Amino acid sequence: MKELIPQLYFKNGRLPPNELKEQCMFRISQFFYGHPDGLQLHEFKLVTKEICKLPSFFSPSLFRKIDVNSIGLITRDAFIDFWVNGKMLTMDMATLIYTILKQLDLKYLSQDDFKPVLQELLATHPGLEFLQSTPEFQERYAETVIHRIYYYINRSGNGHLTLKELKRGNLIDAMLHADEEEDINKILRYFSYEHFYVIYCKFWELDTDHDFLIDKENLIRYGNRALTYRIVDRIFSQVPRKFTSKVEGKMGYEDFVYFILAEEDKPSEPSLEYWFKCIDLDGNGILTRIEMQFFYEEQLHRMECMTQEPVLFEDILCQIIDMVKPEDQNFITLHDLKGSKLSGSVFNILFNLNKFMAFETRDPFLIRQPCLSRNKQERENPTLTEWDCFAHGEYIRLSMEEDVEDASNGSAEVWDESLEAPF
């Protein structure tokens, strides 16, 4: 008797098991019962959440994917044809989201593909309801969330988010969390309003002429003039990342989002890659003593100008080698940096004077656990990143400044004119 070999590859997706298919068909019939003409968009949200198990704010995107003729209704048969016959039933969550958002003729997700999802989140999430009276800030919030997603997940940096990148990232978990959690600020990955507020206010503080562009002199003021001119020159040479502003010598808002995440979340892999490119002057994939000394020279000069006791480069180099423990002590690779928990501090030593000074005077125990010295909330949550700690502290500072300003003006407005964008 000939032995049957089970089919392992399914060109158009694995067929759903009969039991799963029957359960799904029963649920579909329940939701479409009493709607012979089909469901309208506002009636479709439960289908998205209960049958498709997708975040509810994907409902308009899924609806439009099925309603290809823009009739405004989805019939039971049309949904079955798309969801069951289209093999969507057996797809994993990342593949589902990728398939729903992606343009038919492309093999990646663009930033624009996420805009309908953010628009629905802004329209329906209780934690963002207060923004509905300020559409300009809704737009900025959506932009910021998308830029953050691409900074951390689109590792190729080409603006083309692949299915592989989506599966590797933590976006799906963040989206599901956002759909269940009413306090948007508890969604630290990507969606926190407080994080958006910090990024936007930091940009607005530097953009003195409010043309939504930043030049070198603007950026040098970042962090109370913490950065060296040499590192700012490298950023504006667009070595770590090509600017999207299209204006010569100017950084746009998206470029700034990438910068601030790189600067305040240095231990993360995207940040290490960003700064490695800056220090690697000849682009040969290694950091040499000469390259590190070139950047540290300005730090040394600044310490001398401030009558601080200078730390000689020879001592600094020994410290860096001890922190990173490179495979070859003659140079440092990106792989070496990614293997060390102190790599972010290496970059601070080379071009951020304020953080370097703080690093030099901190308790050695706290150096390895940067959030432990902040506050009770951060001590109790070991998953917090350096960015989370920074954003939390800055949000409190900005809120206090705004409260003082409101009190002095006799106003309780959430947004005053000094923070309004030039729309």
Image (tube, rainbow, N blue to C red):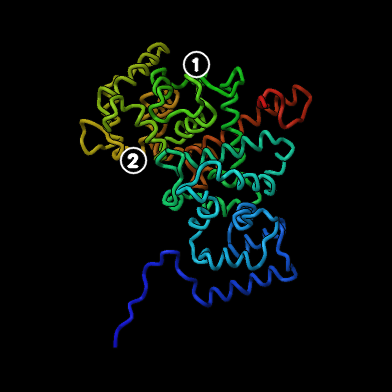
In the figure, is residue 203 to the left or right of 168? right
Give the residue displayed 53% in from the left and 77% down from the top.
19
> Which class describes the residues within 10 Å of circle 2: few (<14), some (14-19), or many (20+)?
some
Q: Which mark is residue 338?
A: 2
Q: Can you give x and y, in whole percent of width and height, for residue 310 in the image?
A: 34, 17
Residue 364 visible? The answer is yes
Q: Identify the element where label 1 is drawn.
A: helix
* Amino acid at circle 2: Lys
Quadrant containing the C terminus is: top right
* Earlier sequence position, callout 2 versus callout 1: 1
User: Does 134 appear above or below 77?
Assistant: above
The x, y position of residue 376, in whole percent, is 55, 43
Q: Which residue is mark 1?
A: 217
Tag of residue 249: none
The span from disc 2 to disc 1 (Cα, nearest Å) is 31 Å
Determine contact: label 2, label 1, CB under 8 Å.
no
Camera-side residue of 43 and 194: 43
